[in-house]
Amino acid sequence: ASSSKQASKKESNMPRNVLLLSSARVGSHFLMENVKSHPKVRFCGEILNMPSGTFNGRESVVKFINEKLLEKCTADIPYVGFKVTPHQLQAHGIRLDELAHSLDVHLIIILWRKNALATYTSLRMAMETDQWYLEKGDKNKADSVVLDVKEEEFMEYVTEEERHWQRVAKEYPISIPPIFISYEKLTADPRGEVAEIWTQLSLHAVETKSVMQKQNPRPLQERISNWNQLSQRAKVSSVKVPSIINEAILSKIPKPAHDIIPERNPPPPASGWKYRVANAFTPSESKRNVHTAVETGNVSSGTHWVSKMSEILKHLHQCPVAQPCSNGYSALVLALMCIKLKPGDEVIIPSLTMVAVANAVKHVGASPTFADCMENGYNPGCKEIEAVASTRTRAVVTCHLYGTPAPILQIKKLCKARNWVLIEDISECVGVRIQDESKKLRHLGSFGDFGCASLYANKIVGAGDGGYVVAKDPVFGPVLRSLVNHAFTPSFHFLHFRESLNAKINGMGAAFACGTLGKIHEVMEHRSNLSSWYREHLKSSGLTLMPECGFGDTPWVFAVQSGTHQTRVQLRSHLAKWGIETRNFFFPLHLQPTFYNESFQGCPRAMRLSCTGFYLPTFYGLSKVAVGDICLKIRDFFKGQQHVSSDMKLDPKRSFSIFFDTESFLLECREYEDNRMVSVECSNSAVLQATWLLNNLLPNYYLKETWSNRNSIKTEISHVLRKLKGPQFEALRKKLDIHLRYIELSDPRDEHTCYAPWIAEPWKIGDIPTTTEPETVELLRWIIQSNEGVKTIVEIGSWLGGTTSAMAEVLCQRESKSRGKIFAVDCFKWQKWMNAYVPPRDTLKTTEDFEKHFTKNLGCYGDLVCTVPWEYGSSLDSKLLPSSIDLVFLDFSTNESEIQNAWDTMRPKMVPGKTIIVINSIGLASHSGVLEWITKHREEISEVYKPHSHAKAFIFSPKGDLKEAIGNAEMNRWLKFSNPAKWTHHHLSSYDSIMTTLQSEYDCNEAKVMFIPAVGQFLCDHEEILSPW
């Protein structure tokens, strides 16, 4: 593709509006001046200060305000504010909630003044002097004004103010967080109060600046002539705005819930979230699947991707029916529709779960009945279920909250005895396994009559959005296929016998899900590690940790409980300041305004968990170091170290992707910042060249690594690196740079003098599957065959024993006393890639142990092999290896850190100048970790053999160790010199002079080594040496 002009375009940011709600004369101008000290904030002021009748309905008001806000909006100013008063809202006939939602208000600042008499006198003075605010340097007209306050009129003013605020409170939009600022605190500490607003807006604090000054600094008794005649009631009167607003909000929530109302989520710091509570799992397999679906037009619900997803789910849950659908809610609805509930039927569900469960029950016309959590657990047990059961109970839904398994075997037994349908909601535990009645591991969702799951982006495995239903009874297969699609009837396509919904998943979503579901074992392994890291760091932190989550302890999210609700509020706020996002537990469903029933007795354990529980960042890719960092901040909180580094800055989360446009044949290099695409650059040919290098030229070069190809490949890489400019190519440059450094430090062979004695007698390839190339196996066999000293062999990555048996065959040819031993190191757990190298009948389940198959394949060579099971990534126990190692074959990982882990264990057992290391997978496109490791260890290993394969043999030769050995040894430097060359014609006899000098220092007739100054002449002078040839 030819170069194309850059098409870089920054996404425009619409302003996030801020509403300042206050009465007159409470310091609003002073507040606005200070807030807009921040360069990211602008204020339009009091833009509705107009006579009533100016506007024709809410639409004209919203249009007018929008125009004013957009005048202040620029690309660099994300927040624009405006002020309204309760009087103005009522004068123009506008509801606060409708105005806020129409303008997409992000935050409402409520400014109030505690002393109503001070507000009233300030208003009177402004009206008399017509001076509504005072800037520095202005003459204060109110300095000499003294007012006579009529108490009756003043109390009417207070009553009127309360009435206006009460009306506003009833209209308050509960979805928008309020921040209350008092005039008294604002004037005493402007920067501190304004910083709270900036924090809510996720902005850095800056110095405040304002030209405003206080208009009425005199005490009230000096401003009121009849101060002594006023009652104490008048002097301390207050319109308690925060109480009025909060009481109105509380009135919408059942009284029993008032003490456990969840706090608003703390905002991120100005630098953004360092650790999100969840990140979508987007493996490369899912991306390829979606791309294929788009390119082939398989994007609808009628494509093969949905069928393929169904087959994967049937295999996962070992059930005959699996119906993909649009989300977890629709999955529940479909399962409930299958059992044909009637009005009045009851379904028992946990109180502590996501609202979708109760909504699904209501959707099908049944009534949800809420069960409490069992003691010391997150889910209801049989006792709690039976406590709320009635003669109308038809079904039970278990939810395995946050990945903690409910006592499903007991619940299953109870449901069978009571003739109830058991539905498992496994939205939070897809992949979690427990033992069944026969002690075999089975996935949750496989125990009930139905299993329903959400595949939302934050779940263990996801599809962006999506879900599925599995069923034990095959009769529900055609039922679900019909219900998921408006209850279409296959034989009469437009004839419908039931009401239903459209709950289909599209082809792209199913394609994505096929990728994530295929990686589920890898994800669960990480979840298990993540849980163990959290438990280790937090075991004495002051928090109660969640129960273990099935086999291997694999939670959806890692949940904890604080001692009190207030501790949770403070701890979450503390973590947010460090950029650590958290989430509260669900709010109990029985206290939700939409489901509340005063006669219900309540669920005290669910309530307690709800007001003290929250969960920490939990997602695939979260590292051990990151977990340690998060837990350190938690421990600091409990130690009282709640300071926050003022210079904590995070770079925007940047990522890049490359997209090939099949119409223009251009590569689009896309840049993303904080999950938003910020630029698109049409790439030149450098990316294509880099791709060709990595996938074709370099793998072919590494087969030979000859001198003639070395310089040309170096030149090609350097040329491409110069053309790959910009941060979007950083990952590509890094990969190429690894290859370049390896090639520069390698010792390529002269292709005209290549000698490969290991191929003189080719080895007959056996029947045991292996991924090792034939010539690599021949090299290993030749090293063992030609060197009797090779007795202890360590093979890491033995798989099914193909290479192991080939080496053991050579050892078997030796005398029994000197045969030696092979230490076969492997995790012996089946992985998905292995299926491609064995016949379908020989494939195993992922993670299934195959050590017995390895042992069986060795046959008669079994006595020469010692198996060493090792979980890659963990420490390799050196006690399981021999004390001295002669030959190492590394063919188990392309990850640099995993190779280093094994090397650290083996290195002390290697013999300098003797131990040979054969490394496989050198130079393959996706295996740069091997090259990186070799490059970093050039001081310890030297190249000795290069087969025509992606392997290479090195000898262990650490320079420091050799220098020490040489220094301690007595070296015999004597040589037996042959006759001088007598090359008097050569550079004025200088060559002869050098030889004569060397002979005078090192010549010894008894020496065992002959030194020949001129080999060619020597051979010509001694024909008896050449004649046998």
Image (cartoon, helix red, strand yellow):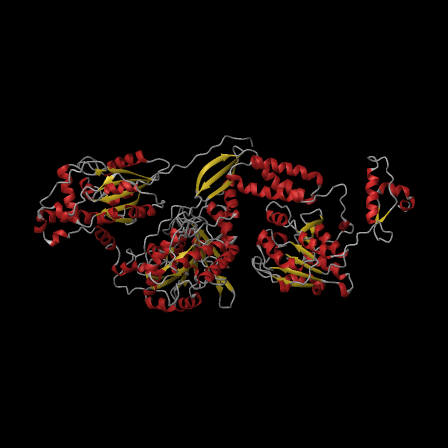
Q: Quadrant of residue 350?
A: bottom left
Q: Nearer the viewer, residue 621 or 973?
A: 973
Q: Nearer the viewer, residue 947 or 580?
A: 580
Q: Quadrant of residue 83?
A: top left
| 522 to 983, vertically: above or below | below
How far from the left and from the top, in percent, is residue 765? Answer: 72, 53
How far from the left and from the top, in percent, is residue 148? Answer: 9, 45
Q: Nearer the viewer, residue 701 or 123?
A: 123
Position of the N terminus by quadrant: top right
Q: Is residue 481 left or right of residue 786?
A: left
Q: Quadrant of residue 208?
A: top left
Position of the C terminus by quadrant: top right
How far from the left and from the top, in percent, is residue 602? Answer: 30, 64
Q: Is residue 1022 left or right of residue 56?
A: right
Q: How many marks?
A: 0
Q: Nearer the viewer, residue 114 or 966?
A: 966
| 247 to 419, vertically: above or below | above
Write the residue at 52% across / 53% down.
519
How far from the left and from the top, in percent, is residue 957? Answer: 69, 53
Does any portion of residue 559 appear in the rendered image?
Answer: yes
Does any portion of residue 913 appear in the rendered image?
Answer: no
